[in-house]
Image (tube, rainbow, N blue to C red):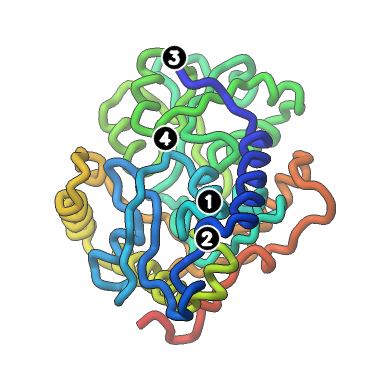
Amino acid sequence: MPSTRSPRRALAAAVALLALAAATGCGADAAAGGGAQTTELRYQGSVGQVTLPELAADLGYLGDVKLNWIGNVTGGPADIQATATGQSDFGGAFNGAIVKLQSAHAPITAVVSYYGSDAQTFQGYYVLDGSPIRGPRDLIGKRVGMNTLGAHAEAVLRTWLARGGLTADEIGRVELVALPPVNTEQSLRAKQIDVAVLGGVIRDKAVANGGIRTVFTDYELLGAFSAGSYVFRDDFIARNPDTVRAFVTGVGKAIEWARTQPRETVVARLKAVIGKRGRNEDATLVGYWKSSGVAEKGGVITDREFATWIDWLSDAGELKGAKPKPSDLYTNRFNAFANPGGGA
């Protein structure tokens, strides 16, 4: 069972790596040398799942831009840290994690939403059918398994606990455990944890297996919202604006393609992508796909999607100094869907 790790320590490590990368020139893109914009983007994927950029590439929406898979990642904070330090060219994370990393002076900017919660796709907090856990106070002293700490699952949980009347000390007595998403259901059924945070196709598969029930969901708590964004380093954006524009608009088109196609068509395409890429994966999970959960057309980002978490992080003492403005953390200038009639 992996142990918990302080999000602050993880963030500090990322900032230290960022400083090293800046000093050594690590991760400089192809445009730095000859002026031509790079057309290859290094990225991290997810086991048994298809990311929106992968779907966009398969649909031909990225044009001349090619994706270079460098490995898999289980959590958003680690993904955007890799981008900030030049190990990858883009990464995606919960918007609150982006706020924290940018507040630590990481030169990254969010450019397009890529996941969220709606009536079909959401993150739920699940217990075994026989569990006595019903409300916030029942979680004191209990173990909650989630994909990573300091991100979406933790922020939503702490918001729910605070709204349920728990004090900061009581919230601190809820133990958070980082687990790979593919192992979280198994850990709950083995009673290694008391609550499992399950989302997307992993949640749907677990529910279909039976024997678990919902305590609450982020959709019930907050309504429909886009929860995470893809980011690029600012220097990469400056050198490769056309590449970023092709990526953002391509991802936006993939969001809308998936939103407007019959579910069976999307699932078949996702399974085909997994089959073609040859990573020795089980395609079972994508059979449970329902939606991306992205709230705005084409992944356009709004202030609300960052303001919610800026306020939460500030109230929790996670941000030092003045609160950042949401509009300073993201840009829609590369997204054709942000303009009237765009994205066609």
* Proximity of marks 1 and 3: CB atoms separated by less than 8 Å: no
Marks 4 and 1, how far apart at CA: 21 Å
- Given residues 278 and 338, the one toward you in this image is 278
Report how far apart the C-alphas of labels 2 and 4 lie in the structure. 24 Å
Q: Which residue bears the numbered disc 1?
A: 80
- Decide: few, some or many residues near mark 4? Use Cα within 10 Å; few <14, some 14-19, many ≥20: many
Q: Amino acid at mark 1?
A: Ile
Q: Which residue is mark 4?
A: 198
Residue 128 sits above or below residue 111 on the image: above
Mark 2 or mark 1, earlier in chain: 1
State left or right for residue 181 relative to residue 208: right
Task: Report whether residue 296 is seen.
Answer: yes
Which mark is first along the chain, 4 or 2? 4
| Residue at figure coordinates x 81%, y 47% from the top left | 320
Residue 282 to residue 52: above or below: above
- Which one is nearer the viewer's eye here, 266 or 216? 266
Give the mark toward the camera: 4 or 1: 1
- Of badges 1 and 3, the one in the foreground is 1
Q: Position of residue 30 (x, y in %)?
A: 44, 70
Quadrant for the N terminus in the image = top left
Q: Earlier in the sequence, mark 1 or mark 3?
A: 1
Separation (CA) of disc 4 from disc 3:
15 Å
Badge 1 element: helix
Q: Amino acid at mark 2?
A: Val
